[in-house]
Amino acid sequence: MDQDSRIYVAGHNGLVGSALVRRLQAAGFTNLIVRSHGDCDLENQGAVFKLFLEEKPEYVFLAAAKVGGILANATYPVDFIRSNLMVQNNVIDASHFSGVKKLLFLGSSCIYPKLAPQPIKEEYLLTGDLEPTNEWYAIAKIAGIKLCQAYRAQHGLNAIALMPTNLYGPGDNFDLASSHVLPALLRKFHEAKLSGAQEVVMWGTGTPRREFLHVDDLADACLHLMQHYDAPEIVNVGTGEDLTIRELAEQVKTTVGFEGRIVQDTTKPDGTPRKLLDVSRLHGLGWRHRIALAEGIRTTYQWFLDNQAVLRT
Ligand code: GFB
């Protein structure tokens, strides 16, 4: 990519898209194309093709997606499968028909089988049953990977697909009904500290293990692979380290400075027991994460405190 290449970031208001815009701007890319949902509904094929015809992007980061935590995934299955299929089909099709030079598609670590051997290698895709709480989202993302690979095989589209682990960071969703665990815990401990509550509720048993990657690290990995990776095989993007939800809750509690108890709500699902990514392919491509979890929790909490007015809650 040249500094003045036309680069479209689809989903630039989201957690990942906004991090991508920050990273690309910091690297000196001057010709970024973005559209808010009101200006271009990515579920509308006509609107997407019009955008591509008008703006003629050369590089596309497809970070637009319907995302959410374990409860939102299980509650809104239609939204998670249908919206993601429509958005990714439109953007990938338009990328092909308008002749983009390269497309980067983002999947998720939840595409892998629920009981995949750990750490999860890329080749474990489609070797077993999915985790039921997020199979709708996972099926859409798997279809996106396959569409990228199909366009490459049939039409030579240079499309690559990355599988990020659980993400967090500035711009995250802090709405307790739809968020992921890390922003939910930050908010719950913070509000409990302010109100003087004695306890904070942690969903599930606390025993599932999760891997967390700061979204600024993901954006850096996307830029690196956009510039240095051109192959059909998917690439995991994570830290290669995980911890239990209970351990995460203890870390967030300490960072926030809450002094009460953590109690379990086992009416809420645990989800998959573990999904630690094998990141050897990523390391072999010359990229490693930089932001340690403790530092990332601290800076995300600071961001949460500094941005109360614009929080998604
Ligand atoms: O982050 P999370 O919602 O998604 O939940 P997944 C991770 C774990 O944290 C689960 C527990 O075991 C939850 O029960 N947890 C504890 C909580 N307290 C809370 C809380 O207050 N809020 C939330 N949300 N969880 C998602 C998938 O799975 O991961 C998506 O549903 C996507 O499709 C995403 O792949 C990365 O890690 O279980």
Image: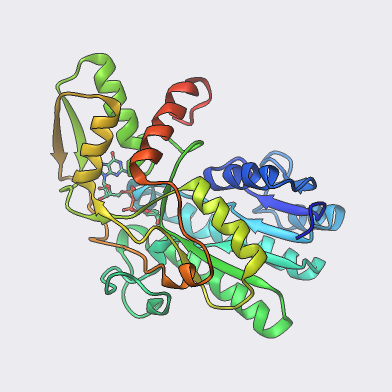
Q: Position of residue 253 (x, y in %)?
A: 24, 31
The total of numbered circles placed on residues is: 0
Q: Is residue 298 above or below residue 82?
A: above
Q: Residue at x 46, y 73 (%)?
A: 281
Q: Is residue 264 above or below residue 46?
A: above
Indicate left or right for 280 with 105 as reference: left
Viewer-nearest residue: 82 or 237: 237
Q: Quadrant of the N terminus?
A: bottom right
Residue with the most extreme top position: 195
Residue 306 appearing in the image = yes
Residue with the most extreme right position: 54
Indicate left or right for 150 with 249 as reference: right
Q: Quadrant of residue 203?
A: top left
Indicate left or right for 92 with 252 as reference: right
Q: Quadrant of residue 53?
A: bottom right
Residue 174 appearing in the image = no
Q: Is residue 40 above or below residue 142?
A: above
The image's colouring method is: rainbow
Q: Position of residue 44 (x, y in %)?
A: 69, 54
Q: Residue at x 24, y 31 (%)?
A: 254
Q: Is residue 57 above or below residue 185?
A: below
Q: Position of residue 186 (x, y in %)?
A: 33, 32
Indicate left or right for 91 with 264 as reference: right
Q: Position of residue 111 (x, y in %)?
A: 41, 67
Viewer-nearest residue: 21 or 178: 21
Q: Residue at x 19, y 47 (%)?
A: 204
Q: Quadrant of the C terminus?
A: top left
